[in-house]
Amino acid sequence: MYKFDPKVIRVGISGCLVGQKVRFDGGHKRSDFCSEQLAEFVEFVPVCPEMAIGLGSPRPSIRLVNLGEDIIAQTAKGVDVTAALRDYGRNLATQFSGLSGYVLCAKSPSCGMERVRVYHESGKGNAKEGVGIYTQELMQAQPLLPLEEDGRLNDALLRENFVTRVFALHDWQCLCHEGITAAGLITFHSRYKYLLMAHHRESYLQLGKLLADLSVDVAAKADAYIKGLMQALSIIVTRKNHTNVLQHLQGYFKRMLNARQREELSDTITQYRQGILPLFAPITLLRHYLKEFPNEYLQQQVYLNPHPEALRLRYGI
Ligand code: SF4
């Protein structure tokens, strides 16, 4: 089930976010970004854990309750559904190794990723400190899987970061599908150089050291590599880091561009740094010069094309 297919990027999603009427009130919480834009490029795998354990829709809402030693999920009638949600999540999540990401419904006691309301046992007061029961199992079984919540996807930086991670993990899964080799790992790392440098320069260096000697333990090193890569990519890129990378890339064209072109590129990067232009502007110019003056090393850099252009993810950052 949900086996990896290099031709399809599969992304799990809370069923209510793709318009399924599975919520406790019989409604849905359709995400326009997921249903109208991202769906063009990925195949969603919708799951509603509460429907799956037989709660039906409409149903009494459930909530997380802090019992001191444990946090449980309880229906409004006091029925404890924690074990059912956990068992379902644990069983299903082991079948998710073919997924490349997961979009979760925020605030849900089953699907929420963070800051889910946890009520005190007494019924008085609550704290936004919980994680949905189903999602806890998902996180444990698939620690590499990029996760994001629907509400957070409205933030341009978080949205771009999530989609970047989904495409990067899928890229990695394709490499694994072909069979990991020392040469394949080195090429992969070299393609991710500038993307990694933008997210976290130290990780780029550390991961390079990890791959320095691949004469033994290639499989173990590959495991450590993808862990480090996904961790680094989860760090949001600052304008300063993007600027550093853009200036590095600018250096490749120094000798090919005439004075006017050099000035244009330099001004565009400066205006990006100052927040006047979006990232899309200097990237487009670099790609334009790359077409004019092909450079094999730069052409394979994921940084210049981390996700489909049509998603317009670099227009707003
Ligand atoms: S948040 Fe999760 S459990 Fe709740 S309706 Fe959506 S998919 Fe179902």
Image (cartoon, rainbow, N blue to C red):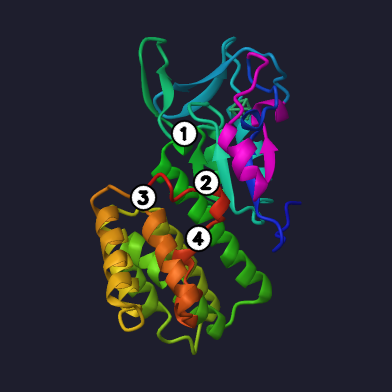
Q: Nearer the viewer, residue 51 or 12?
A: 12
Is residue 4 rendered magenta in the image? no
| Residue found at the far bottom of this picture | 215
Ligand 1 shows up in the quarter that is top right
Q: Label 3 near label 4: C-beta < 8 Å?
A: no
Q: Which residues are magenta?
A: 25-53
- Residue to which mark 2 is pinned: 139
Q: Position of residue 30 (x, y in %)?
A: 61, 28
Is residue 36 rendered magenta in the image? yes
Q: Secondary structure at mark 4?
A: loop
- Which amino acid type corresponds to the residue marked 4 in the rendered image? Pro
- Residue to which mark 1 is pinned: 131
Q: CA distance from mark 4 to mark 2?
A: 24 Å
Q: Secondary structure at mark 2?
A: helix
Q: Secondary structure at mark 1?
A: loop
**Residue that appears at 56% across and 37% down:** 33
Q: Position of residue 190 (x, y in %)?
A: 45, 77
Q: Label 3 near label 2: C-beta < 8 Å?
A: no
Q: Label 2 near label 4: C-beta < 8 Å?
A: no
Q: Is residue 125 above or below residue 140?
A: above
- Sequence-wise, which precedes: disc 1 or disc 3? 1
Q: CA distance from mark 2 to mark 1?
A: 10 Å
- Sequence-wise, which precedes: disc 2 or disc 1? 1
Pointer 2 residue Cβ closer than 8 Å to ligand 1: no
Left or right for 12, reference 67: right
- Residue to which mark 3 is pinned: 278
Q: Secondary structure at mark 3?
A: loop
- Residue to which mark 4 is pinned: 306
Q: Nearer the viewer, mark 1 or mark 4?
A: 4
Q: Label 4 near label 1: C-beta < 8 Å?
A: no
